[in-house]
Image: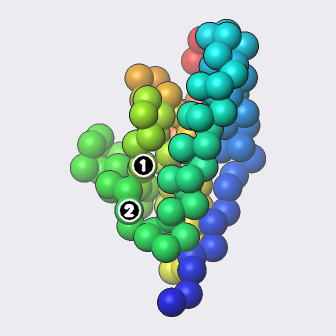
Amino acid sequence: MPMNKIHVSKKARADLTEIKRYIEVELENPTAARAVTRRITDDIHALRDHAMLGAPLHSAAAAPGNYRFLVTGNYLTFYRVSGADVYVDRILYGRRDYLAYLFGKSSPQENS
């Protein structure tokens, strides 16, 4: 069975780095930082075999497009599927205004 190809955007990579830094430095918990980022990356890797694993975003919010999302603890991974390609666009804290991050403002600093 062919596997899907995962494409992780620069923003999603930066999101993951920021999540790890926040937990490691601000919350002073390097062990949790590693565990959380590992769970998120494991969930992303699961998309290789099961691209439709996440729920459609329009099922949770009035959102345009074909976004899907995975829930990993307090974090949401937003992605799109096109054929055998999976595009991971953002990884955001679930209590943020994720629609603004996806479709409006481009960085967390702009929403502070």
Is 112 situated above or below 15? above
Is 37 situated above or below 45? above
Q: Based on the displayed image, in which of its 4 quarters is residue 15 positioned?
A: top right
Percent position of residue 102, x then y: 52, 40
Percent position of residue 72, x then y: 44, 40
Q: Is residue 101 left or right of residue 62?
A: right
Q: Amino acid at mark 2?
A: Leu
Q: Is residue 92 left or right of residue 31?
A: left
- List the residue tagged with mark 2: 53
Is 54 situated above or below 107? below
Q: Is residue 36 left or right of residue 76?
A: right
The 10 Å Cα crowd at callout 1, few under 14, some 14 to 19, many 20 or more, is many
The 10 Å Cα crowd at callout 2, few under 14, some 14 to 19, many 20 or more, is some
Q: Amino acid at mark 1?
A: Leu
Quadrant showing the C terminus: top right
Query: Which residue is pictured at 27% across the width and 43% down the height?
Result: 60
Query: Which residue is pictured at 43% across the width and 29% down the height?
Result: 74
- List the residue tagged with mark 1: 70
C-beta proximity under 8 Å, tags 2 and 1? yes
Sequence-first disc among 2 and 1: 2
**Secondary structure type for disc 2:** loop
